[in-house]
Every structure is written in structure tokens, then in C-alpha cells.
Amino acid sequence: MKVLALAPYPVEAAATRYRLEQFVAPLAKRDITLTIRPFLDSKSFAQLYRRGSLPQKVFGFLKSAVLRFRDVIAARRADVVLIQREAMMFGPPVIEWLITRAFRRPMVLDLDDATYVSYTSPTYGGAGSALKWFGKTDDLIKWAAIVTCGNRSIAEYVESKGARARIIPTVVDTALFQPAPRAADDPVVLGWIGTHSTFPYLESIFPVLSELAKEYEFRLKIVGAGKDEVSIPGVEVENLPWKLEREVSDFQAIDIGLYPIDASLYSGKWAFGKSGFKAIQYMAVGIPYVATPVGGSAEIGEPDTTHFFATTGDEWHRALEILLSDVERRQRMGAAGRRHVVEHYELPAQADKLAAALREAAKQV
């Protein structure tokens, strides 16, 4: 069976990498050929959230839009078209309409975020919201034969629209994401790896980290914040840009993972659509973490065994204090997390789910 996947971003984006690219080989073993066509190339994606360079960005978007119409022709030869979030990053769903209505190709829509919730872009502001055309996701849900969803919250929304939902969490290859040895005399590293849009979530617990630094010695590793400098009173901060080739080693260098989600930012509904992927990455490399129980993070792992939940500042302080002061507790929880991921979130099992969804959609020609 031939499947054409259209994604907004190249492989440097986690959604493309983990919900499409890593399934190419497993699906091939299941007699499904998956071809991926991103809207933006790597160069345009690298410029996307940088300040300035507007002419280059506009040209890149227009070039990508023209090339995307070429993919519509390729879609005619596919048994199923898999849309990861949206075929184009702006405007109405013209590409998806042509594929499903003009060429009658069955479409599987993949949602790992609540893209049906409107929000104001921290980079582009109101102009970005106007171009985004947030209402398109509801149309895509309506046109899709099946919608694969990153968590239960998204699936419930999809089903409320009368569509068929299949929950496929975002996972990692546990042969790549493995625990790494840490020297006993190394300083404890609290870590967060994310994007410029989720960095405000981390900022919400800066006061807690500052208070903890008065009593405990630790270093804070931040990756992907999109900031040249990050300063927290009393805290030693290592602030790095995100790099694909360093992704696994960055996670392995952490002793305690941080996963705050401030639902008051952007939109509470948007936060509830988060798939909880960071929790799986932390557990895969065998480290305990503290998370806000919002969206997918509330469904993943075993509270008090693989991780702690925290919502208020006091809860964050208490949970991190336990992990900072008890190395054996950290080790036990990290090992439990690794076991949990291997038992419940292995890549082959999720590949089986995706293959079943694609075959089910293909029957609806």
C-alpha cells in the first residue's frame, strides 16, 4: 500500500520526526510505503521563528505553496493521504479539499496538538493568527476517514465532531533513547528541552527554582528556549539552542526532568491538547520528572512511581526537593520510568496501530 504524508514542517520538527519519519521503516515491514513531503524545507524552517528576515520568509512560504500543489498530483497515485496537522501552514484547506473531494483519495488526519484552538502567535502576533485559519481543522476532521490523535483529549474533541478517532501517542525508539551512565560526583542537573512557544511554561516555575537554589546545589539545563540569555537568581543556567544531532545526549545529561504546563497561557484548551511527549522522552532515558497534570502528561506514567505531579508553586517545591535530596529515589523512579515506556510505549506497537488505521481508511475509497 502506498501512503503519501503531507506535513507542515521538515524532519527538524518533532511532529514530523516522531509521528511520521520514524514510522517509515516499521511501516515498510508491514507492506506500507510511506513517502513524506514537508511544506517547509529545512532552511525555511530554521528562519521561521527568527526575528526579521521577512522578505526571505515570505518568499519561502510562497515557494512552498507552489510546490505543495505539485504534491496534489502525487496524491492521485497514493492509496491513502496522511495529513500531519495541515498540508499548508496558512490559509484555507485547499490542498486537502482537492485531495478528498476532487480526487476522492481517502485521508487520515494526524493531530498531536489541539490545532482547532485559536491562539496568538508569540512570534507573529495577530497577523499570524489571521493567516493561520484556525477553523480549517474542523473541516479536516469532517473530511478525514480516520483521525489519529496524540491523546484522549484530542480524541474526545474529534469524536464530538462525529469522526472516528484512534489514539496513537507520540513515542521514541527506545533503542536510541536509552539511559546513560552518570558519574556519582557530577552536579545534579535539572533539565527542560522544548521550544520558544513552550518556554513561558518553564518561566512559570523560575521562582521555585530560585528558592531551591538557596538550599540545594544543582544546575539547570535549558535547550530550545529561543533566548540568547536566560537568568534566574541564584541558579547556574546552561542555555543551549536545540540541535537535532544532540537531541538524545541532551536528554541523557539530565538527572531530573521538568515538565511544567501553565494552562493560563495561550489557552487552557490548547494546553489540554498537549500529547505528553516530553514525559515519554524523560522516562525512555531513565530519569524521573515533575509534570503539571494537563493534557497527555496526566495520562502517561505512574504518579509517585515514575514521576511526581505538581500544579502550585508549593507542590513544585516539594516534589523537586524530594528528588534533589534523595539520589536513590531518583534512581528507582528513573528505572521504573524506563520499564514503563518499554512496556507501554514501544514503537512497534504504535506502528501496528498506525498501519491498522491506514488500512481501514484505504477501504473507504
Image (spheres, rainbow, N blue to C red):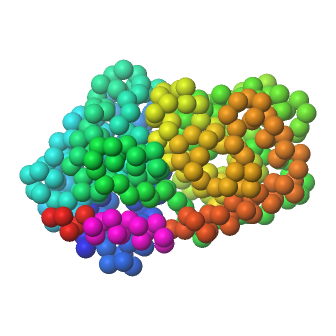
Q: In what quadrant of the picture does the C terminus appear?
A: bottom left
The reply, left or right, for residue 349 in relation to residue 300 is: left
| Magenta span of residues | 348-360
Q: At x 66% / y 43%, what residue is drawn? A: 291
Q: Does residue 182 show up?
A: no
Q: Position of residue 272 (x, y in %)?
A: 50, 39
In this rendering, the count of numbered labels is 0
Side (left or right) of 246 relative to 42: right
Dominant secondary structure (helix, strand or loop) of the stretch shown in magenta: helix
Q: Is residue 107 magenta?
A: no
In the image, what residue occupies the spot 28% across and 28% down? 131
> x%, y% of residue 102?
8, 52
Please tell me whether residue 179 is drawn above or below residue 201 in the rendered image.
below
Relative to 218, does residue 253 appear above or below in the rendering? below
Specify the quadrant that holds the N terminus: bottom left
Whether 349 is among the magenta residues is: yes
Residue 159, given in percent of the width and then of the height, sits at: 34, 48
Identity of the residue furthest to the left in this view: 102
Image coordinates for residue 177, horizontal then vertical, percent: 62, 63
| Residue 262 appears in the picture as rendered | yes
Answer left or right for 34 relative to 333. Answer: left
Residue 224 or residue 132, whichever sits in front: 132
Q: Quarter-wise, where is residue 246 in the image? A: bottom right
Left or right: 100 in relation to 215: left
- Nearer to the camera, 65 or 147: 147
Q: Residue at coordinates 41% horizontally, 36% vertically from top-left?
A: 48
